[in-house]
Amino acid sequence: MSYGQQSQNPYYQAPAPQQESGYQPAHGYGQANPYAQDQYEMQDYGNQDQYGNQYGHPYGGTQSTQQQQQPQQGAAVLSQAEFLERVTTLRNNIRGLTADIDTISSLHQRTLSSTDGNARAQLNNFVEQTRSRNQAITEEIKALELDVKKTKGPDNTKKPQFESLRTYFKSELDKYHSVERDFEHRYREQIARQYRIVNPDATEDEVQEAAQADWGNEGVFQTALRTNRTAQASSLLGNVRARHNELTQIEHTLAELGELYQRLAEEVIVHEDRIEVAENNAQKTVDNMEQGNEQVKRASDHARRARKLKWWCFFIVCLIILAVALGVGLGICLTGNKCGGGK
């Protein structure tokens, strides 16, 4: 990515609010979202401050992603033609994101090279515009993901098209993340250089500490001025404070990108799938109960047969005892010639 070829950037000479940047949303992000009634309720981004304070936690946090809403489930499945139309429109919007990232890179370079307040204001406008664009594209991608999951049949060609679109968007987010990381490093290097000018006797550890310091804190600023109260030192430290403000904005942007990565990775839950799972579980419960009843029946049959066998054994033993007793009695009778009562 080129940071110096500012003249090639169509946005550079006259950066403007979102509606003038060449960005044409799929159905107008400032208007009614086509998914709002069918599948998605967009988050209200208008209540954020300049740097998106709701994303104040470190990069990769989970606060915002946990608050995102799942798609509404009552929408009809898109036809293949409708799906392709929305994919094509989203691809065009992502190309607009590429242009925004190049513009932000150029404005970062311009801000880094001078104290031009106009460049800083333009940078803030483009960062805010790109934030809204990223989040709107993310929500529409999640809506398409829901449609893919609801589309049934062996001839479903939506999934590969959707995966290609999501990969494309992620690659642009990666590019934006790389640009912000690069300029974060450059801003800190500039803070370190200017701090060395103000405090030439500072150790390397002190310089690195200054590069990480909170220059928005008046106490830090005044402490740095104690060792050098010249007009040049005051001006340089003012520039350091300005660089710190840019770093603060970059940190918020990186945090927001972390939120978007996690949002894209979240799995859309289809309510129909939940119902199907519940029905399957209910059927399994019925099957298990039937199997249990069958086991109880077999156990009862075994117990009944065991009782019958026990009685048969008892009768057989009694017959054996009776036969033995009869045999013994007859034997004694015949041996003693006492059976006929003869004398």
Image: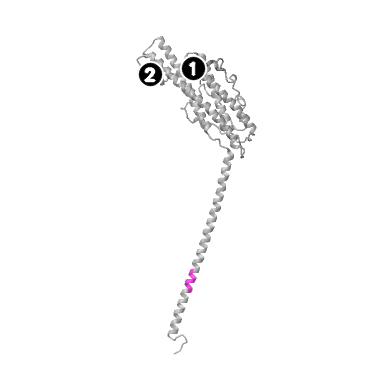
Marks counted in the figure total 2
Residue found at x 42% / y 17%: 191
Q: Is residue 46 visible?
A: no
235 versus 50 height, above or below? above
Residues drawn in magenta: 313-319
Q: Secondary structure at mark 2?
A: helix
Identify the mark at residue 109; answer none if there is no mark: 1
Amino acid on which disc 1 is placed? Gln
Residue 287 in percent (x, y) is at 56, 50
Graded by Cα atoms within 10 Å as few (under 14), some (14 to 19) or many (20 or more), the crowding at tag 1 reads some
Q: Quadrant of residue 215?
A: top left
Q: CA distance from mark 2 to mark 1?
A: 23 Å
The image shows residue 296 at horizontal and vertical percentages of: 53, 56
Q: Earlier in the sequence, mark 2 or mark 1?
A: 1
What main secondary structure does the magenta stretch of the protein show? helix
Front of the two marks 2 and 1:
1
Which of the 4 image quarters holds residue 331? bottom left
Give the image location of residue 126, x and y in percent.
Answer: 54, 20
Residue 207: mark: 2
**Residue type, label 2:** Val
Compared to residue 236, the image places residue 163 above or below, namely below
Residue 98 visible in the snapshot: yes
